[in-house]
Amino acid sequence: MTAAEIRAAVIEILKTISPDSDFSELDDERPFREQVELDSMDFLDIVLQLRKLYRIHIPEEDYPALQSMASTVAYLEPKMRDLQKV
């Protein structure tokens, strides 16, 4: 998957978790929690959806790498380079 495809996939996951949020103005450099109302369970849902849809294991110690869209895409890109949605 490309960086753009990963970004789109993460936005789709965010839309299921926070359907009333507007993601058209999402600043990729700012933390998600500053832009969207996400609690720790919502964040865990993001990780679980990535695991379910793409079979990606994200260890708990790597969760800080998923703070913003830019850091999330940078973290996921090498892991998802050759993946397709399940």
Image (cartoon, helix red, strand yellow):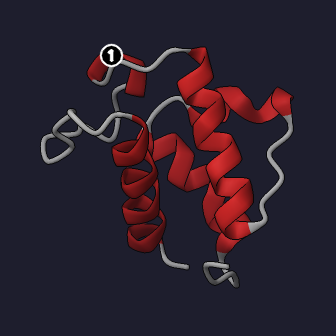
Quarter of the view holding residue 66: top right
Disc 1: CA contacts within 10 A as few (<14), some (14-19) or many (>=20): few
- Seen in the picture, residue 73 relative to 62 is either above or below; the reply is below
Quadrant for the C terminus, please. Answer: bottom right
- The residue lying at 77 percent from left, 60 percent from top is 56
Q: In this image, 48 relative to 14: left or right? A: right
Q: How many marks?
A: 1
Quadrant for the N terminus, please. Answer: bottom right
Q: In this image, 71 relative to 60: left or right? A: left
Q: Secondary structure at mark 1?
A: helix
**Residue pointed to by mark 1:** 34
- Front-most of residues 69 and 53: 53
Residue 16 horizontal/vertical position (percent): 40, 46
- Seen in the picture, residue 75 relative to 46 is either above or below; the reply is below
- The residue lying at 38 percent from left, 57 percent from top is 12
- The residue lying at 61 percent from left, 36 percent from top is 45
- Seen in the picture, residue 29 relative to 72 is either above or below; the reply is above
- The residue lying at 45 percent from left, 63 percent from top is 9
At label 1, the amino acid type is Glu
Residue 48 horizontal/vertical position (percent): 70, 45
Residue 18 horizontal/vertical position (percent): 34, 34
- Seen in the picture, residue 2 relative to 18 is either above or below; the reply is below
